Image (spheres, rainbow, N blue to C red):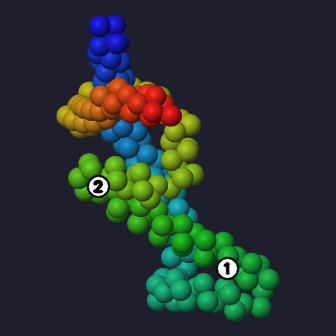
Protein backbone atom coordinates (compact mmCIF):
# COMPACT_ATOMS: atom_id res chain seq x y z
CA UNK A 1 0.00 0.00 0.00
CA UNK A 2 2.81 2.41 0.88
CA UNK A 3 4.54 1.62 -2.42
CA UNK A 4 1.34 2.34 -4.35
CA UNK A 5 0.92 5.65 -2.52
CA UNK A 6 4.57 6.56 -3.13
CA UNK A 7 4.22 5.64 -6.80
CA UNK A 8 1.16 7.88 -7.20
CA UNK A 9 2.92 10.84 -5.59
CA UNK A 10 6.05 10.32 -7.67
CA UNK A 11 3.92 10.33 -10.80
CA UNK A 12 2.05 13.46 -9.72
CA UNK A 13 5.29 15.23 -8.86
CA UNK A 14 6.82 14.18 -12.20
CA UNK A 15 3.76 15.43 -14.06
CA UNK A 16 3.81 18.79 -12.29
CA UNK A 17 7.55 19.29 -12.68
CA UNK A 18 7.64 18.33 -16.35
CA UNK A 19 4.57 20.49 -17.02
CA UNK A 20 6.43 23.49 -15.61
CA UNK A 21 9.52 22.65 -17.64
CA UNK A 22 7.46 22.08 -20.77
CA UNK A 23 5.71 25.43 -20.38
CA UNK A 24 9.15 27.10 -20.40
CA UNK A 25 10.25 25.56 -23.71
CA UNK A 26 8.33 27.84 -26.13
CA UNK A 27 9.52 30.89 -24.19
CA UNK A 28 13.13 29.66 -24.38
CA UNK A 29 12.72 29.03 -28.12
CA UNK A 30 11.37 32.57 -28.61
CA UNK A 31 14.33 34.03 -26.72
CA UNK A 32 16.74 31.91 -28.77
CA UNK A 33 15.13 33.15 -31.98
CA UNK A 34 15.27 36.76 -30.77
CA UNK A 35 18.95 36.41 -29.95
CA UNK A 36 19.56 34.78 -33.35
CA UNK A 37 17.78 37.69 -35.05
CA UNK A 38 19.97 40.17 -33.18
CA UNK A 39 23.17 38.40 -34.20
CA UNK A 40 21.96 38.17 -37.79
CA UNK A 41 21.08 41.87 -37.93
CA UNK A 42 24.48 42.80 -36.53
CA UNK A 43 26.32 40.55 -38.96
CA UNK A 44 24.31 41.60 -42.01
CA UNK A 45 24.71 45.26 -41.05
CA UNK A 46 28.49 44.84 -41.02
CA UNK A 47 28.36 42.96 -44.32
CA UNK A 48 26.26 45.74 -45.89
CA UNK A 49 29.28 48.06 -45.76
CA UNK A 50 31.25 45.63 -47.90
CA UNK A 51 28.25 45.06 -50.13
CA UNK A 52 28.09 48.80 -50.82
CA UNK A 53 31.73 48.71 -51.89
CA UNK A 54 30.98 45.69 -54.10
CA UNK A 55 27.99 47.54 -55.58
CA UNK A 56 30.14 50.58 -56.31
CA UNK A 57 33.24 48.82 -57.63
CA UNK A 58 32.21 45.35 -58.83
CA UNK A 59 28.57 45.65 -59.97
CA UNK A 60 27.39 44.14 -56.68
CA UNK A 61 29.62 41.04 -56.87
CA UNK A 62 30.81 40.45 -53.32
CA UNK A 63 32.93 37.50 -54.43
CA UNK A 64 34.85 39.83 -56.77
CA UNK A 65 35.53 42.16 -53.84
CA UNK A 66 36.86 39.24 -51.79
CA UNK A 67 39.02 38.13 -54.72
CA UNK A 68 40.38 41.68 -55.11
CA UNK A 69 41.30 41.71 -51.42
CA UNK A 70 42.90 38.29 -51.67
CA UNK A 71 45.01 39.23 -54.73
CA UNK A 72 45.97 42.68 -53.47
CA UNK A 73 49.60 43.64 -53.05
CA UNK A 74 48.68 45.68 -50.00
CA UNK A 75 49.15 43.59 -46.83
CA UNK A 76 46.25 45.30 -45.09
CA UNK A 77 43.76 44.29 -47.79
CA UNK A 78 45.19 40.79 -48.00
CA UNK A 79 44.83 40.37 -44.24
CA UNK A 80 41.28 41.69 -44.39
CA UNK A 81 40.29 38.83 -46.70
CA UNK A 82 39.94 36.35 -43.83
CA UNK A 83 37.79 38.78 -41.87
CA UNK A 84 35.56 39.43 -44.86
CA UNK A 85 35.20 35.73 -45.69
CA UNK A 86 34.34 34.94 -42.06
CA UNK A 87 31.74 37.70 -42.03
CA UNK A 88 30.13 36.39 -45.23
CA UNK A 89 30.12 32.84 -43.84
CA UNK A 90 28.67 33.94 -40.49
CA UNK A 91 25.92 35.99 -42.11
CA UNK A 92 25.00 33.11 -44.39
CA UNK A 93 25.01 30.65 -41.48
CA UNK A 94 22.80 32.86 -39.33
CA UNK A 95 20.40 33.44 -42.22
CA UNK A 96 20.11 29.68 -42.76
CA UNK A 97 19.45 29.22 -39.04
CA UNK A 98 16.69 31.84 -39.19
CA UNK A 99 15.09 30.17 -42.20
CA UNK A 100 15.21 26.76 -40.53
CA UNK A 101 13.42 28.14 -37.47
CA UNK A 102 10.40 29.16 -39.51
CA UNK A 103 7.47 26.83 -39.63
CA UNK A 104 5.44 24.76 -37.20
CA UNK A 105 6.43 24.56 -33.55
CA UNK A 106 7.48 20.90 -33.67
CA UNK A 107 9.88 21.59 -36.58
CA UNK A 108 11.39 24.53 -34.72
CA UNK A 109 11.95 22.39 -31.61
CA UNK A 110 13.40 19.57 -33.69
CA UNK A 111 15.82 22.01 -35.27
CA UNK A 112 16.72 23.51 -31.90
CA UNK A 113 17.50 20.07 -30.49
CA UNK A 114 19.34 18.65 -33.50
CA UNK A 115 21.14 21.57 -35.15
CA UNK A 116 21.47 24.18 -32.48
CA UNK A 117 24.08 26.92 -32.68
CA UNK A 118 25.86 25.96 -29.47
CA UNK A 119 27.40 29.36 -28.57
CA UNK A 120 24.06 31.06 -29.17
CA UNK A 121 22.22 28.37 -27.17
CA UNK A 122 24.63 28.79 -24.24
CA UNK A 123 24.30 32.58 -24.46
CA UNK A 124 20.50 32.24 -24.36
CA UNK A 125 20.69 29.74 -21.51
CA UNK A 126 23.03 31.94 -19.46
CA UNK A 127 20.69 34.92 -19.79
CA UNK A 128 17.46 32.96 -19.43
CA UNK A 129 15.08 33.69 -16.59
CA UNK A 130 12.13 31.41 -16.12
CA UNK A 131 8.81 33.09 -16.72
CA UNK A 132 5.40 31.57 -16.77
CA UNK A 133 4.18 32.63 -20.19
CA UNK A 134 0.78 31.04 -20.55
CA UNK A 135 -0.34 30.86 -24.14
CA UNK A 136 -1.65 28.10 -26.36
CA UNK A 137 1.84 26.93 -27.40
CA UNK A 138 3.16 26.84 -23.84
CA UNK A 139 0.17 24.87 -22.58
CA UNK A 140 0.35 22.41 -25.48
CA UNK A 141 4.09 21.83 -25.15
CA UNK A 142 3.89 21.66 -21.35
CA UNK A 143 1.14 19.07 -21.42
CA UNK A 144 2.89 16.99 -24.08
CA UNK A 145 6.17 16.96 -22.16
CA UNK A 146 4.39 16.18 -18.88
CA UNK A 147 2.29 13.35 -20.32
CA UNK A 148 5.22 11.73 -22.15
CA UNK A 149 7.57 11.93 -19.16
CA UNK A 150 4.90 10.69 -16.76
CA UNK A 151 4.03 7.77 -19.03
CA UNK A 152 7.69 6.81 -19.37
CA UNK A 153 8.16 6.95 -15.61
CA UNK A 154 4.98 4.97 -15.01
CA UNK A 155 6.13 2.26 -17.44
CA UNK A 156 9.48 2.11 -15.67
CA UNK A 157 7.75 1.82 -12.31
CA UNK A 158 5.56 -0.99 -13.69
CA UNK A 159 8.61 -2.81 -15.05
CA UNK A 160 10.58 -2.45 -11.83
CA UNK A 161 8.72 -5.22 -9.90
CA UNK A 162 8.92 -7.54 -12.92
CA UNK A 163 12.65 -6.98 -13.26
CA UNK A 164 13.15 -7.37 -9.51
CA UNK A 165 11.24 -10.67 -9.45
CA UNK A 166 13.32 -11.96 -12.36
CA UNK A 167 16.53 -11.01 -10.58
CA UNK A 168 15.37 -12.65 -7.35
CA UNK A 169 14.32 -15.75 -9.29
CA UNK A 170 17.76 -16.03 -10.90
CA UNK A 171 19.49 -15.61 -7.55
CA UNK A 172 17.37 -18.33 -5.95
CA UNK A 173 18.22 -20.77 -8.75
CA UNK A 174 21.94 -20.23 -8.20
Q: CA distance from mark 2 to mark 1?
A: 36 Å
Height in image: 34 above or below 89? above
Residue identifier under label 1: 81
Horizontal and vertical percent position of residue 146: 29, 30
Residue at image point 33% right, 39% down:
26
Residue at image point 62% right, 74% down:
84
Horizontal and vertical percent position of residue 77: 72, 81
Say which quarter of the image contains residue 161. top left
Residue identifier under label 2: 107
Left or right position of 160 against 135? right
Height in image: 61 above or below 101? below
Height in image: 135 above or below 111? above
> Quick one: which residue is furthest to the front in this view?
173
Quadrant of the snapshot with the N terminus: top left
Height in image: 107 above or below 90? above
Q: Does the image show residue 155?
A: yes
- Give the mark nearest the N terminus, 2 or 1: 1
- Front label number (2 vs 1): 2
Which mark identifies residue 42?
A: none
Horizontal and vertical percent position of residue 20: 34, 25
> Quick one: which residue is furthest to the right in this view?
75
Task: Name the residue nearer the viewer: 127 or 25.
Answer: 25
**Element class at badge 2:** helix
Horizontal and vertical percent position of residue 93: 48, 67
Q: Does the image show residue 23?
A: no
Amino acid sequence: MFVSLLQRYILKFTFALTLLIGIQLPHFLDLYETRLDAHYLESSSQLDHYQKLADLLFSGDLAALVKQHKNSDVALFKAETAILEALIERTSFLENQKLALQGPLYKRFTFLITQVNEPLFIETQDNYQANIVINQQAILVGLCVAVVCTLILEMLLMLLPIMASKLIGKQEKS
